[in-house]
Image: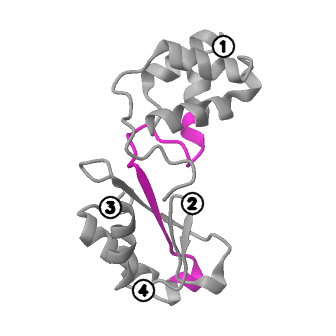
Amino acid sequence: MKDNCKCGSAVPETVSEEAITEILGRHDSRVDALIMILQDIQSVYRYLPEEALRMVAAKLEIPFSQVYEVATFYRSFSLEPRGEHEIKVCLGTACHLRGGPLILENFERELGIGAGGTTKDQSFTLETVNCVGACALAPLVLVDTFYFGKSNSSSVKNILKKFSDE
């Protein structure tokens, strides 16, 4: 269902120096491309393994603390494994008023995790966002790159089913 989904493809269990070197090469091993390098690493591993961060620091010849600082500054980066699918429930004003918190509760109940958590099988990560700028579609749920506008509590199971049957 996801445009650039690596669905069904296994996430590498160990960090490959060859893979990190290839990613760095795509960015000419430029320090000013650090954010893009980390994005590419996260797209392979679904998080930023410490070993990968240390390799990047060594290969770019910068302190590990500098790489770690960037990795922890941006909310889009994760130091913990993420689910194959990321669910984001909008809790901005319009979504909140139209039932966003109830939708979140239903996702938490169906997945057995709280906001910020990842299911044990690493299929889903559940997040909340403050606003995605699509208030006319409130309440809004995003799964990967797909928007589900005018969602309600009963649509939660249908949304999960679309991404569970891949």
In x, y percent, where is residue 57?
59, 16
User: Which label lies toward us, 2 or 3?
Assistant: 3
Which mark sits nearer the N-terminus, 3 or 4? 4
Residue at image location 36% in from the left, 22% down from the top:
14
Neighbour class for label 4 at 10 Å: few (<14), some, many (≥20)? some
In-image side of 114 versus 30 (left or right): left
In-image side of 153 versus 90 (left or right): left
Residue at image location 55% in from the left, 28% down from the top:
68
Neighbour class for label 1 at 10 Å: few (<14), some, many (≥20)? some
User: Could you tell me how far apart the alpha carbons at marks 2 and 3 are, in whole angstroms?
Assistant: 17 Å
Instruction: Check contact, mark 4 vs mark 2: CB within 8 A.
Output: no
Is residue 78 or residue 85 the one in the foreground? 85
Q: Mark 1 sits on what residue?
A: 60
In x, y percent, where is residue 142?
52, 67
Q: Residue 83 colored magenta?
A: yes
User: Could you tell me how far apart the alpha carbons at marks 3 and 4 are, in whole angstroms?
Assistant: 21 Å
- Residue 145's mark? 2
Residue at image location 66% in from the left, 77% down from the top:
134
Magenta stretch bounds: 71-95
Q: Mark 3 sits on what residue?
A: 165
Neighbour class for label 3 at 10 Å: few (<14), some, many (≥20)? few
Task: Identify the amino acid type marked 1.
Answer: Leu
